[in-house]
Amino acid sequence: MVIIGSHEPPKTRVLVVDDNPDTVESTAMLFQSARYETRTASNGVEAVERTMIYRPDIVLLDIALPRQDGYAVARTIRKQPLSPQPVLIAVTGYADKPRL
């Protein structure tokens, strides 16, 4: 049955930011399989640029990024006139690194 004039609800937009190609690809695939609209970025500068253009609802943000770390990316995004501001979720592999 087709209902004329019905609309699918807007999909939640997710930006996955990580410099590890396997991590960013598998995480993006996970969100896509759950029907989220998903984009990716591989460094801090790209993350800020994609946030401004794509306007994600959620940003999964690696902390240890090249060109601009996740902390700087978060500060930069928060200074932008985005309404609403995306939810920022920090993701890091620092726990896997041996401590000296």
Image (spheres, rainbow, N blue to C red):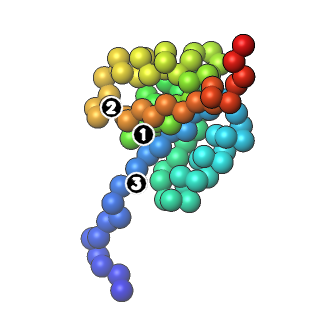
Query: Where does label 2 land, which residue?
Result: 85
Q: Which mark is residue 58?
A: 1
Q: CA distance from mark 3 to mark 2?
A: 16 Å
Q: Position of residue 79 (x, y in %)?
A: 35, 17
Question: Would you place residue 6 above or below residue 83 in this image?
Answer: below
Residue at the image position 42 percent from the left and 32 percent from the top: 88
- Of the two numbered discs 3 and 2 on the same chain, state the one appearing first in sequence: 3
Q: Position of residue 14 (x, y in %)?
A: 47, 43
Q: CA distance from mark 1 to mark 3?
A: 12 Å
- Are the two marked residues, 1 and 3, in contact with CB atoms closer than 8 angstroms? no
Helix, strand or loop for disc 1: strand
- Of the two numbered discs 1 and 3 on the same chain, state the one appearing first in sequence: 3
Residue at the image position 61 percent from the left and 22 percent from the top: 64
Quarter of the image with the C terminus is top right
- Of the two numbered discs 2 and 1 on the same chain, state the one appearing first in sequence: 1
Question: Would you place residue 16 above or below residue 82 in this image?
Answer: below
Question: Would you place residue 42 above or below residue 16 in this image?
Answer: above
Judge the density around disc 3: few (<14), some (14-19), many (≥20) Cα neighbours within 10 Å.
Answer: few
**Does any portion of residue 20 appear in the rendered image?**
yes
In the figure, is residue 27 to the left or right of 71? right
Residue type beneath disc 1 = Ile
Give the camera-side residue of 67 and 54.
67
Helix, strand or loop for disc 2: loop
Residue at the image position 72 percent from the left and 22 percent from the top: 98
In this rendering, the label closer to the viewer, 1 or 3: 1
Q: Position of residue 47 (x, y in %)?
A: 53, 27
Residue at the image position 64 percent from the left and 40 percent from the top: 24
Examine the image and state in which quarter residue 76 appears: top left
Examine the image and state in which quarter residue 97 appears: top right
Q: Which mark is residue 11?
A: 3
Q: CA distance from mark 2 to mark 1?
A: 9 Å
